[in-house]
């Protein structure tokens, strides 16, 4: 479990270095806002990682095994790529800066593929809740470092030196790759690249059935929809309610982040105690109802205590559902194809965060904040309707759960 915390930290570290932290450096360098906005495209590999995930299932590095070998490769290259950011000047070399940032995003997404597959392979079913929670805790700590500590460092040293300092922190991941045990599987990796691309999809739908498989995919998209929809508009809501940027930064970025970490740890414990299925039910209901605190704040108006309460409860809920959903994803991935299957399923999970929340601003603008937050509660209903199909309350494991003994079989051709 200790190795999973370190791997979570290693996964989270590069994310903001090509987004918010890089945007801050470019802003200080007087880069125009249009260009800064376009730089968000360098994060595209995170959404497309399922395209090359089969390569990490098919090919085994000659050291440390199939999962840890790829972890070490991506981490060493990430250290070099992040340190290389220090050689750029945003004022005169934007093209090369963009290329470097894209390379970091690609390597980071590749590391995520390897970490997700490793976590799925190494954990037994009963360990998945706890394993998911400690990994997310490490991930969130890394976001705190790159989202807060990086700015403190930038007040004391130039941004290039900040990137060099942060690149060194990835040694945490390198250490984890060496000390983490290699999963003990009896299955051989896919024999050909074609098998690595085709069989993960065949195996999933043959195991689950077409109807059940589609239900699982829809459930993954909608499970965090309620929280994601509310979260997509939290900052504009708080600003329009009259809170200062400092107040929002301290409470949302500090207390909110801590609440998410605590929620993740509690969530993992609950999953271990009552099982994945029941935890998914309990947390789905909590997630939707937690948005009523924002509804109350929208009615009451500016109230610092109420804002803190709303943010703490909402972020606790975020931690709960994240721990449960990651445990669910691991449970439905076949260990032989875990890199490809988890990459595809996690891309669907990102859809509720990045795509289907798009109408949120229009809803708030058209109907006002109180109605918007009522809509976010209603947004939890699709997941609740799918739960009896994908994770019945009375069953211990999801209906599409994969075998986790290592005795998996290839799908029929």
Image (cartoon, rainbow, N blue to C red):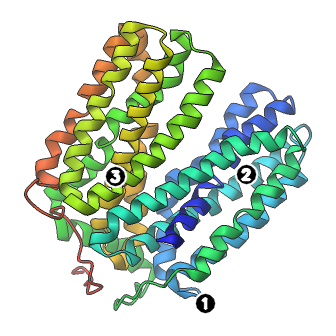
For label 1, the SS is loop
> In the current view of this chain or complex, which residue is farthest to the front?
305
Name the residue tied to disc 3: 267
Q: Earlier in the sequence, mark 2 or mark 3?
A: 2
Q: Residue at x 57, y 66 (%)?
A: 6
Query: Horizontal and vertical percent for residue 114?
Result: 51, 70
Q: Circle 1 sits on which residue?
A: 63
* 309 to the left or right of 28: left
Q: Which percent across, then down, holds residue 293? A: 35, 22
- Asked whether residue 356 appears in the rendered view, the answer is no
Residue 101, disc: 2
Looking at the picture, does residue 249 appear above or below residue 265? Answer: above
Q: Earlier in the sequence, mark 3 or mark 1?
A: 1
Q: Nearer the viewer, mark 2 or mark 3?
A: 3
Within 10 Å of the Cα at label 1, are there few (<14), some (14-19), or many (20+) other Cα atoms? few
For the point 34% across and 52% down, the residue is 267
**Foreground residue among 100 and 367:** 367
**How far from the left and from the top, in percent, is residue 171?**
71, 69
Asked if 384 appears above or below 79 in the picture, the reply is above
């Amino acid at each position: 479990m200790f190795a999973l915390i370190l791997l979570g930290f290693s996964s989270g570290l590069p994310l903001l270095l090509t987004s918010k932290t890089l945007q801050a450096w470019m802003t200080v360098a007087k880069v125009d806002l249009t260009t800064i906005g376009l730089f968000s495209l360098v994060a595209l590999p995170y959404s497309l990682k399922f395209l090359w995930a089969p390569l990490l299932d098919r090919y085994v590095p000659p050291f440390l095994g199939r999962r840890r070998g790829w972890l070490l490769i991506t981490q060493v290259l990430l250290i070099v790529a992040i340190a290389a950011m220090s050689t750029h000047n945003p004022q005169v070399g934007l093209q090369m800066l963009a290329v470097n940032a894209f390379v970091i995003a690609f390597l980071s997404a590749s590391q995520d593929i390897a970490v997700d597959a490793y976590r799925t392979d190494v954990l037994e079913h009963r360990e998945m809740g706890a394993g998911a929670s400690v990994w997310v805790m490490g991930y969130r700590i890394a976001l705190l470092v790159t989202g807060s500590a990086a700015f403190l460092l930038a007040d004391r040293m130039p941004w290039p030196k900040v990137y060099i300092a942060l690149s060194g922190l990835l040694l945490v991941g390198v250490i984890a790759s060496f000390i983490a045990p290699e999963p003990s599987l009896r299955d051989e990796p896919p024999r050909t690249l074609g098998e690595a691309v085709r069989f993960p999809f065949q195996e999933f739908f043959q195991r689950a059935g077409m109807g059940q498989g589609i239900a699982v995919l829809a459930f993954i998209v909608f499970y965090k929809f309620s929280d994601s929809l509310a979260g997509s508009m939290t900052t504009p809501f708080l600003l329009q309610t009259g809170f200062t940027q400092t107040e929002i930064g301290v409470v949302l970025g500090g207390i909110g982040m801590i609440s998410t970490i605590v929620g993740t740890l509690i969530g993992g414990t609950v999953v271990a105690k009552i099982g994945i299925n029941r935890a998914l039910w309990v947390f789905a209901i909590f997630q939707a109802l937690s948005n009523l605190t924002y509804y109350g704040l929208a009615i009451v108006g500016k109230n610092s205590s109420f804002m803190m309460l709303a943010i703490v409860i909402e972020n606790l809920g975020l931690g709960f559902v994240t721990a449960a959903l990651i445990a669910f994803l691991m449970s439905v991935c076949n260990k032989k194809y875990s890199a490809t299957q988890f990459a595809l399923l996690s891309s669907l999970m990102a859809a509720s965060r990045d795509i289907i929340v798009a109408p949120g601003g229009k809803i708030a603008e058209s109907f006002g904040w109180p109605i918007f937050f009522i809509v976010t509660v209603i947004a939890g209903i699709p997941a609740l309707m799918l739960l009896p199909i994908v994770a019945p309350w009375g069953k211990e494991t999801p209906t599409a759960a994969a075998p986790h003994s290592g005795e998996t079989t290839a799908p029929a051709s």
